[in-house]
Structures are given as structure tokens and as C-alpha cells.
Image (cartoon, rainbow, N blue to C red):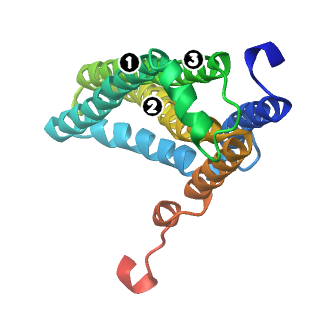
Amino acid sequence: MSNLGLTAPDLFAFGFFVAAWGAYHILLSRSPGAGTGLNNMMDHYRVRWMIEMSERDNRIMDASLMGSLQNGTAFFASTSLLAVGASATLLRATDDVVKIFADLPFGGDVTRSAWELKIIGLILIFGYAFFKFAWSYRLFNYTAILVGATPARAAPDQKERRRVAMRAAQMHIAAGRHFTRGQRAFFFALAYIGWFAGAYAFIATTAAVLIVMSARQFMSDAHEAINYEPPEKDRT
């Protein structure tokens, strides 16, 4: 890999980055404690929302909430495309950037090929985020359709009403899952940017992002809020 301008520390740092991303994914989806994560706990409320929706005759509020989720997802999808374009623009300024980094105390020996490889990696991360957000947007559309297709509370076939509501809930969970993975790509893109300052900075930014994201899932104020139990006097 020396002909590409990547050193042994660079390869180690990149390996650590990939391992951290994979480990975080496993932590939230397949580990024994995954169910206590904020994302997974919110999935229970997605199901509860769709069940409550099926019991309502007036679903204007549900339609409004779905619209807000779709608009937020569309914003992130558009931002991803802008990030891809901005990253691609950096490829045109490779020679200037190499000269600038060569004069910086932390820049090290930056080569043209190494810089281009790092930029391509950044483009791939933002491209991945775009596909996740775009698919999430589509799934939120599907959820809205299922909400509209849920029979009314007074419908004679109550089993069908429950069945469609649960399908809407599962579609909603899938949409949220892909949205979360798109946001995760954004967070790890911030860690990836540390690579431009050097391999050791890359390791440090990756570790920092991993710690912050894990803390938000299991030790944040939002996690405390979802587990909040009001005092006995407030329950009566």
C-alpha cells in the first residue's frame, strides 16, 4: 500500500474505524443488551402509536406526524447529496491541499493518491447515507399509506384492522431503522474527517464518536426520559 501513500498507522486506523462502526451496529442490533438501547425502546412506542392510531376515528394528527417525519428525512437526504457534491469538489483541489498540508505541523507527508483515496472514502460514506435516507423516506411513505388503509374503529372486521395497524407499525420500525443508519453514517463521517489530520487523530476521533454515540443510546437524558417512572402521588 506504500505506492498509494498509506502508511501502516493509516491502515490500522482505517481498520479500527471499520471495526468500531461494525461493533456499534452489533451493539445496537444483536448484543444481549440491545433491547435496552434508546432506538430499540422507541420501536415499542412506534407499535403503540399505530395501535392507538387504529383506535382513532380522526387521524389528522397521525397524518401530520407522518408528514413531519417525511420532511425531516427528505432534509437529511438532500444534505447527503450536498455532502457528496462538496466532497467530490475536493478532488479538484488535490494539488493545492497537498501543498497546504505539507506546511502544517500535523499534516505529515501527504501524497496525492492518499488524499484522493480518503476523499473517495468520504464520498462513499455520504453516498451510503443518502441511500439510507432516501429508502427511509420511501418507507415512511409506505407507512402513511398503511395508516390510510387501516380500517376504521367501527369496521366489522376487527382482526383486519389490527393486522393492518401492525403492518404499519413494522413498516414504521423499518423506516426508523434505515433513518438511524443514515444518521449513524453522518456521525462516523465526522470521525472519518479526523483521518485528514493523521492516523492517530483518526483513531482519536473514531473513539470519541463511538463513546458519544454509545452514551446517547444507554446513558443519556433521553434514555432516562424513556425509562422515567412518575412518583406514586402523580399516578393517581
Locate residue 193: give its quadrant. Answer: top right
Q: Which residue is mark 2?
A: 179
Mark yes or no: residue 232 visible: yes
Say which of marks 1 and 2 sits in front.
1
Q: Which is nearer the N-term, disc 1 or disc 3? A: 1
Callout 3: few (<14), some (14-19), or many (20+) C-alpha neighbours within 10 Å?
some
Please, what is the three-letter code of the amino acid marked with disc 2? Answer: Phe
Is residue 207 depicted above or below 171 in this figure?
Answer: below
Displayed quadrant of residue 3: top right
Residue 21 percent location from the top left of the image: 68, 35
Q: Is residue 204 above or below residue 1?
A: below
Q: Which residue is mark 3?
A: 120
Q: Residue at x 63, y 47 (%)?
A: 105
The one of 72 and 127 positioned closer to us in this rendering: 127
Query: Closer to the camera: disc 2 or disc 3?
Result: 3
Q: Is residue 187 left or right of residue 25?
A: left
How far from the left and from the top, in percent, is residue 102?
61, 34
1 or 2: tag closer to the N-terminus: 1
Q: Which residue is mark 1?
A: 85
Three-letter amino acid code at the position of disc 1:
Gly
The outermost residue toward the right is: 8
Q: Residue 126 at x, y = what percent?
A: 48, 24
The mark nearer the N terminus, 2 or 3, is 3
Marks 1 and 2 in Cβ contact (< 8 Å): no
Locate residue 116 relative to residue 64 in the image: left or right.
Answer: right
Count of numbered labels shown in the rendering: 3
